[in-house]
Image (cartoon, grey):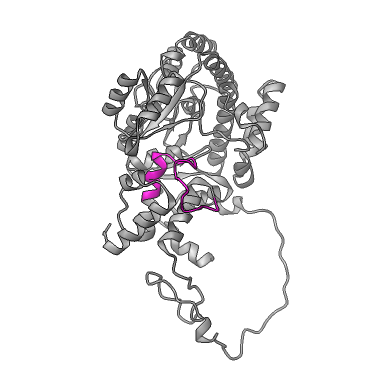
Amino acid sequence: ELAGRLRAAGAARAVGRTAPPVVLLLPGQGSQYPGMAVPFADALPGFTTALDDCLTRLAEEPAARVRAALFDPGFPAAELERTELAQLALFCVEYAAATALGGLGVTPVALAGHSLGEFTAAALSGVLDLADALALVTARGRAMGACPPGAMASLAVGEDRARELAAAHGLELAAVNTPESCVLAGPAAAVEALAAALDGPERARVLRTSHAFHTSLLDPAVPLIEEAAAGVRLGRSAVPYVANATGALLPAGTAVTARSFAEQARGTVRFADGLAAVARAHPGAVCVEAGPGQALSGMAVAAGLTAVPLGGRQGTLEALGALWAAGLPLDPAVLTRPGRPAHLPGYPFAGPRLLAPAATVRTAPPAAPAPTPGAAPGADAAPARTPGDLVAARWTELLGRPGLTPDADFFDLGGDSLLVVRLAHRLGEDLGVRVPVRSLLTGPTLAEHTALAASLLLAGDPR
């Protein structure tokens, strides 16, 4: 199993090569889920200490609520969706994960936070100290939570088409996440009407949120956020980070105003422009999503960047391994637990070599490398996997849902257009063919994705 995974990952240490620049991605509201701190606490050294540093700066009651939401998988999801709790919990997880990564040697050249994530970026860059950042996030969540309710929907369309749909349905453009992915928001009834009117590639996915963030429904919150920001000390950025309202990459040394924090909550999130700016400034950068979910990783891939999400305990360990293999100065010894030497009885490795009968030797897939000279036949071989096995495995990896049935729908299980981009990329690597994203969108069931993979293999569609 180890040999197979090393081959699949291509995990060769980049000795003597300059390590790629790292950009931290910091997600916004909607990525939260109960117990989201558990994988980081289990796999990321220093995370718990940094998280405790955040929680001890909060009042006793909110600190207890945040801790329960972060570590109890049974915490009510509906309560965690409340804006004032969701934003505070996300900030604490992101700040702790980024701080822990820094302790391992991952020093970012830039930060890209989506919506609430921009506040985490401001704290990590030195614009806000930790206590002030927590106070400002608390005030922001309270102010936004008091605004009129609304809804949001994600669509796999470009900005021009999104604006046409917004005008036709009485909605506003809340976010431009990629050149082909936007978010519209407004009154819940209007969002529901939009979702009912669209089908096929333009289908709308209603997001799990109680408000229409980044629209005029948030106008009452703007002066309250500005007042809260005016009450804290604002330093200059030490690390460049993306400004959501403009999509610009603010250089180190930028002075940030209290008004900009308020306008950020109201204006369109121009994240696609921000990632494009990052790609221009740091070509070849590796983006690490320091928070729950993989949504921002999909956006980074769409921008032509390499992305490494920290998803789940195994995903976190694999991400750290990928960063080490890329040449970053991570110390593997830090990731191991204390142990002691164990003295084992000696064994004379001598005598005749016995080979298994031919009938029991597994046949390696055609693309597998030749076995190491002197190794027993079939030692590293593995049975060939069908297109159905590969598609199901990638679904489970991206959606976290095992036990899939042929009629399972990728979007009904929590997928979105950004995860479809990642799915197409992963399946293309598995199958050695180019997998069209549009075909995955129009036929979203597991059976349809499997049939598509099989047909592409038969057609021999080259990458």
Seen from the viewer's position, the closer of residues 267 and 335 is 267
Seen from the viewer's position, the closer of residues 407 and 334 is 407
Residue 434 visible in rendering: yes
At x 54%, y 10%, the residue is 231
Which stretch appears magenta?
402-424
Residue 456, picture quadrant: bottom left
- The chief SS type of the magenta part is loop
Residue 370, picture quadrant: bottom left
Q: Is residue 396 above or below residue 203?
A: below
At x 62%, y 35%, the residue is 34
Q: Quadrant of the C terminus?
A: bottom left
The x, y position of residue 447, in whole percent, is 42, 54
Q: Is residue 246 above or below residue 350?
A: above
Seen from the viewer's position, the closer of residues 61 and 212 is 212
Residue 458, picture quadrant: bottom left
Residue 11 visible in rendering: no
